[in-house]
Image: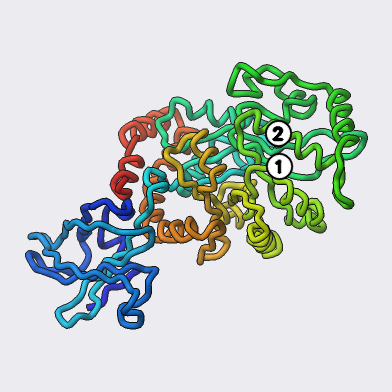
Amino acid sequence: MAYDKNDLLENFDVYPKVFAAGKEAAVHIRNLGGEPVFQPDTEYKMLICAMDFGSARLWPDVADFREKTVRSDGDGNFVFTHTFDREQAYYLRFLTDDNKKLVQFPVYCVEGDLCGRYPYAGDLHIHTTGSDGNQTPEVVCANYRRHGYDFMVVSDHNRYYPSLRAIDFYKDVPTELTIVPGEEVHLREVYGQRNPVHIVNFGGEFSINALVEGTATEEAGTDLSVRAIRTENVPDVMTAAQFEALMQKLADEADLPQGVSKIPYVMCKWIFDRIHDANGLGIYAHPNWIQDVFHVPEPFTDYMMETLPFDAFEVLGGENYYEQNGFQTVRYYEEMAKGHRFPVVGSTDSHSSLPSNRNAFICSTIIFSPENERTALIDSVKKFYSVAVDTISKEFRLVGESRFVRYACFLLKEYFPLHDELCYEEGRLMKQVATGTQEEREEALATLRQIHGRMQRHREKYFDF
């Protein structure tokens, strides 16, 4: 019988799913209680089909189809060894006695630089009640963990300290969600001219908003405890007059093309430089957001792409009309064709983490990183190991460099549905810790302690690194 491919993840456990090129691997295929497909103690012919080199029937001179005989055990399961040669997807295709396809299982092989880099899904631009969002920082973190996020930032407008609140709340809670500090940077006007460009400080060790007198310092003060995660080499807070004079000096010295506004550009450059000083990731956010008209003039974005003061481009953001993400995607590929190479990320720019919000989960980022830790995530994005994910519609779309897009496509179909099931329970318990009664909190914490570490064990099971 032919097996419905949509049931494969529910009815079979294939592990590992990702292998290192040139390394012999043991492949396991286990039935998970569905209708039996394989007979016990029986030999089967299997083809290992390389996706990138065409059909053996149509391209016999270049196709890579390798035949292997494998034998099921007494329960109808398999363990066999194979060495996958090169980076691509493969089908493990089982055949009937008359050489028709019985069932096939997708797996993937990666080259050396991706070995040891696990896929982590997350968001680099989220709002809470710390600015204009609808849920508290701790609840937003729980809701996004429940949705399958491995990492996230609280990046409230003008404010860094809500992200510190989230980190502090969960510091003693056994969760495998990584929460990094951050903010969306909006600095004060300079002689009546403001910088409309939205910039995200992802993971910076100190606040950029709090480097200048304004909303952040007025609300939370200037103590390092509310504006940094480090205690040394944090710049002093400037007065409005000092900042105004500095920006005017930079503008006077700047030699910019016609049509590029001086104050906004020099302010952007200064902000990105300070994010670098803070060891953060500076993100150029949603220039094609429609706020009356496009948020950032096209000549300004042209110059940003030419000079590249930012670390990553938010190619996919928090709106579902085509003009934002569609135009930004076209822009990304055109800039790449010009030789302007830069990393991309996708983010929700969410102001509500509930499913009732149409835009709560429409974009995300997969980062291929050696670990789910702030500095490793930032370093991996800077080294181009990221893919932006568009889930505006049921059929996902990916933006990034071809090699990583192809790999991420496989993972979204064959790995992340299993991953997300584990995240859901952890996120639900996190929300119980954040909002429950004392008894409910203690129950949730006890369960979290019991299950802590299972996500890492899950990764080690499915990635043969």
The residue nearer to you, when weighing 212 against 370, is 370
Q: Residue at x 50, y 50 (%)?
A: 366
- State how the image is colored: rainbow
| Label whose residue precedes the other's in the sequence (2 or 1) | 2
Query: Residue 352 at what x, y percent from top left?
Result: 61, 47
Tell me, for residue 161, which label it has, or none: none
Reading the image, the residue beneath label 1 is 309
Q: Secondary structure at mark 2?
A: helix
Q: Nearer the viewer, residue 387 or 395?
A: 387
Give the CA separation, mark 2 to mark 1.
8 Å
Is residue 408 depicted above or below 423 in this figure? below
In this rendering, position of residue 5 left or right of residue 30: right
Give amino acid for label 2: Asp
Q: Three-letter amino acid code at disc 1?
A: Pro
Residue, x 34% and y 35% (percent of image)?
A: 452
- Mark 1, secondary structure of its residue: loop
Residue, far right: 191
Q: Which residue is mark 2?
A: 273
Q: Residues within 10 Å of mark 1 (few under 14, many from 20)?
A: some
Q: Residues within 10 Å of mark 2 (few under 14, many from 20)?
A: some
Image x and y of residue 51, in percent: 37, 68
Q: Residue 18, how many percent across, how many down? A: 33, 53
Q: Is residue 125 left or right of residue 244?
A: left
Asked whether disc 2 touches disc 1, contact meaning CB atoms under 8 Å apart, the reply is yes
Up the image or down, 20 lies above or below 166; here it is below
Residue placed at 28% from the left, 47% from the top?
461
